Image (spheres, rainbow, N blue to C red):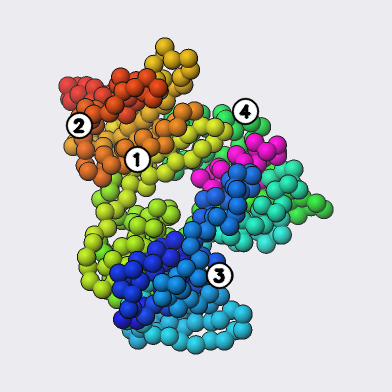
Amino acid sequence: MKIIVVGATHAGTFATQQTLTEHPDYDVTVYEKNDTLSFLSCGIALWVGGHVSDPNKMFYSSPEQLAELGADMKMGHEVTAIDSASKTVSVTELATGAQFTDTYDKLVFTPGSAPIVPPLPGIDSSRVFFCKDWNDAKKLQANADQIQSAVVIGAGYIGAELAEQYAVNGKAVTLVDALPRVLAKNFDATITDRVEALYRDNGTTLALGEKVIGFEDTDTQITVTTDAGRYTADIAVLAIGFRPHTELLKGQVEMLGNGAILTDDYMRTSNEDIFVAGDSAAVHYNPTGKSDYIPLATNAVRQGMLVGKNIAAPTEKYLGTQASSAVELFDRCIAATGLTTEGAKARGVAVESVTIEQDYRPDFMLTTTPVLATLTWDPATRRVLGGAFYSQHDVSMSANVISMAIQTKMTIDTLAMVDFFFQPNFDQPISWVNAVAMAAVAQADRLVQAN
């Protein structure tokens, strides 16, 4: 069988590996426009901040490794058109400009996503940087020691991490976002209020609820103009999100309104000879039971592996995702999975929520620190739908616990009584996960009695 893989960051890399592991006799050709693959872009802020031992270790695979498995690696080749009716792709070799066509039996479409770049005045300035791929990372890292100030546009995970690293390394930072809160799509205000206080305590100017309308170079700096102010710095970094890179299949497969491609349980599109995975694909979002667009490397890796497992025949189903994630900002661990109350509201899902705060281990220990824990659930079924945690203690794995609770359709009642160990070095007799679930049960029972 002849397979063409379009794009090889995470999903394409894992799809290629799994396909050739399952079917070493298959003819697999990979077209990738860059000269590298498998770059862990989530490490860009850490590299800029001086926390990466060796940037080459930010790649977990290479064209050579895939070639050793049997893939025909066409690096520096861009697929410019796809005709699903004739099962052909048009390709341009970027170094020479040579153009040709190729044919496939099965197409694996994994080009990923592209940064959102609005057509604003001055956005083409050499002082405007992006934070997406290896080339972006090298540029940001190269000037990290030269700049004294930065305007970071976008307060999602990428922008928040980059702004934090600039701040802790002594730069004057302005963090801009059109939404009214930092990390507004990831956490509710109970957590983001604390995060915003950390930024301010570390000298960061927060320009929230402000929309960027243009950029203007000065002699040595750049001014970012919003609908509410002007902010000048040595550089500006645009990190306002990503869009699925799916133009080549527009009108040929079913998509969400934003262009993310819909799949069945086996990563097949509406055309069963075309598979899609990663940032180009919609995910099956378990908290709502609907398709959604949540570009995360974890989704890309699992979806890519499933492409390889199902390329010959539907074999293993996609389990869906809870969109679990975590970030460390100013020495605080912040982790979440599933729905926040704001996320539920935006999706038209009814939820209840409760928040508690307790020390992570007993007060008789020489040191301890509080954990803020939030849980959301379906008031009708009492099923767990989301959770979030904030602490100076490492509470990141708590998000994984709640993710499993959502995945298995656990109720708050069951989660409250799940058997977690107690040992004074690590937790309380009633752990913070049990405790927040118990608080949810108590609140749910009160609501039932009130009605």
Task: Determine whether the residue tagged by mark 1 lies in a helix, strand or loop.
Answer: helix
Q: Residue at x 72, y 52 (%)?
A: 143
Task: Say which label, 4 or 1, has the lower sequence index.
Answer: 4
Q: Nearer the viewer, mark 4 or mark 1?
A: 1
Q: Residue at x 68, y 38 (%)?
A: 169
Position of residue 46 relative to residue 424, above or below, is below
Q: Which residue lies under the disc numbered 1? A: 400
Position of residue 385 relative to residue 318, above or below, is above
Q: Nearer the viewer, mark 4 or mark 3?
A: 3
Which amino acid, by three-letter code, is at mark 3?
Asn
Identify the image quadrant of the N terminus.
bottom left
Specify the label residue 414 is tagged with.
2
Task: Say which label, 4 or 3, has the lower sequence index.
Answer: 3
Depth order, front residue of 252/370 = 370
Q: Residue at x 60, y 48 (%)?
A: 53
Q: Which residue lies under the disc numbered 4? A: 201
Structural distance between the alpha carbons of marks 3 and 1: 34 Å
| Percent coordinates x, y for residue 275 in the rendering | 33, 70
Task: Determine whether the residue tagged by mark 3 lies in a helix, strand or loop.
Answer: loop
Specify whether residue 168 is painted magenta: yes
In this rendering, would 377 be left or right of 202? left
Depth order, front residue of 385/61 = 61
Q: Is residue 290 visible?
A: no
Structural distance between the alpha carbons of marks 4 and 2: 40 Å
Q: Which residues are magenta?
A: 151-175
Task: Say which label, 1 or 2, has the lower sequence index.
Answer: 1
Structural distance between the alpha carbons of marks 1 and 2: 16 Å
